[in-house]
């Protein structure tokens, strides 16, 4: 599985060019700085966030493939609805092998306060409270599990200026862990960011990572130094037009002298359907196809096979999403 995914979106607005680029490390490794940059009218703003959310070259290498979903399911059903009072409810059902799993997520937002709760197959309830604009540019949130008092966490997200953001995450346990992140736009189209973590129980720095990204109208180039300097990643994505994107990444693990790579291509078809393919250095090819069946329903089909061993059975995945 690739450790990084990036994508560019290019919108031509008269004689102006708007660039949108994001760096996203996938969930299993949960690191690094996630930058969102927007350049327009000669100004550049930056947003940094951890963990990363789903973003556009994520699309290219990770999203819309059932095998790289956090739950790595065989089949999935999602039903979303919204009540008249503004409560959003999402029901997720997953099938993996012989097991069936699911969860229900509830979200309600009013006057800058957002409440959330997730009830999963396991006997636990995750809850969160987020408050925007506690102070100018500052967002504060508290989250945790009702059944695990040591899981509480406080997150602070501060847009210090139009060119820099800071984020801090502090565990609410008796011996908490803390994470700190910063992202800065140092020049037009150029972002740099850093992350560090500290374990108060051990009195040690648990991680430090740095990243940089240069984005232009049709391409994004990114570089990472991760795992306390043990991992180097370089990623590139290029948008030929609004319907075609190609990209890839190279990852070098210094201590193991191991290098991996992943490439991907995405094509938006006539009628809005999306077709994707990705290939890694192990010869594993993954295909994805997503289409809107009607205004409130979408279907995702994916397949994965080993190009070096075509006799091995391919994997197939399916996901259906409906909005009520």
Image: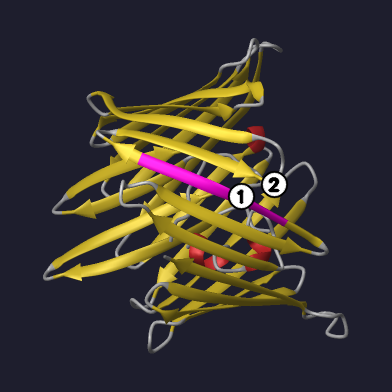
| Pointer 1 or 2: first along the chain | 1
| Residue underneath mark 1 | 103
Of 180 and 118, nearer the camera is 118
Report the magenta stretch's main SS.
Answer: strand
Q: Is residue 259 left or right of residue 274?
A: right
Q: What residue is rendered at 83% in x and 63% in y?
A: 98
Q: Position of residue 282 (x, y in %)?
A: 77, 68
Asked whether the viewer can see residue 287, the reply is no
Report the colour scheme: secondary structure
Q: Is residue 285 above or below residue 120?
A: below
Residue 259 part of the magenta-drawn span: no
User: At x 69% / y 39%, what residue is drawn?
Assistant: 230
Within the image, what quadrant is residue 243 found in? bottom left
Secondary structure state at the residue bearing disc 1:
strand
Magenta range is 101-108
Q: Which residue is mark 2?
A: 121
Eyeballing the image, is 112 above or below 312?
above
User: Which one is nearer the viewer's eye here, 96 or 260?
Assistant: 96
Relative horizontal placement of residue 290, taking residue 18 as reference (left or right): right
**Residue farthest bottom in this picture:** 270
Q: Quadrant of residue 301?
A: bottom right
Q: Are marks 1 and 2 in contact (CB under 8 Å)?
A: yes
């Amino acid at each position: 599985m690739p450790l990084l995914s990036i994508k560019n979106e290019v919108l031509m607005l008269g004689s102006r060019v708007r660039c949108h680029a994001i760096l996203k490390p996938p969930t299993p490794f949960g690191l690094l700085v996630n930058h969102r940059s927007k350049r327009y009218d000669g100004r550049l703003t930056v947003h940094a966030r951890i963990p990363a959310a789903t973003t556009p070259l994520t699309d290219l290498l990770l999203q819309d493939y059932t095998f790289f979903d956090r739950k790595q399911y065989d089949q999935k059903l999602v039903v979303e609805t919204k009540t008249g009072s503004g409560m959003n409810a999402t029901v997720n059902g997953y099938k993996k092998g012989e097991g069936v799993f699911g969860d229900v997520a509830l979200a309600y937002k009013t006057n800058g306060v957002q409440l959330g709760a997730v009830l999963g197959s396991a006997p636990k309830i995750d809850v969160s409270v987020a408050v925007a604009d506690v102070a100018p540019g500052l967002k504060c949130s508290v989250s945790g599990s009702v059944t695990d008092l040591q899981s509480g966490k406080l997150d602070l997200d501060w847009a210090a200026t139009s060119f820099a953001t800071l984020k801090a995450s502090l565990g609410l346990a008796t011996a908490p862990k803390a994470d700190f992140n910063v992202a800065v736009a140092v020049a037009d189209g150029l972002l740099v960011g850093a992350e560090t973590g500290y374990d108060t129980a051990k009195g040690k720095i648990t991680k430090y990572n740095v990243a940089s990204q240069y984005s232009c109208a049709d391409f994004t180039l990114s570089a990472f130094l991760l795992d306390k300097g043990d991992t180097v990643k370089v990623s590139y994505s290029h948008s030929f037009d609004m319907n075609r994107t190609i990209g890839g990444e190279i990852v070098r693990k210094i201590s193991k002298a191991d290098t991996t790579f992943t490439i991907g291509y995405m094509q938006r078809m006539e009628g809005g359907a999306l077709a994707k393919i990705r290939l890694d250095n192990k010869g594993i090819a993954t295909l994805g196809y997503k289409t809107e069946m009607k205004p409130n329903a979408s279907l995702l089909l994916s397949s994965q096979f080993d190009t070096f061993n075509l006799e091995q059975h391919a994997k197939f995945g399916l996901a259906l999403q409906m909005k009520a």
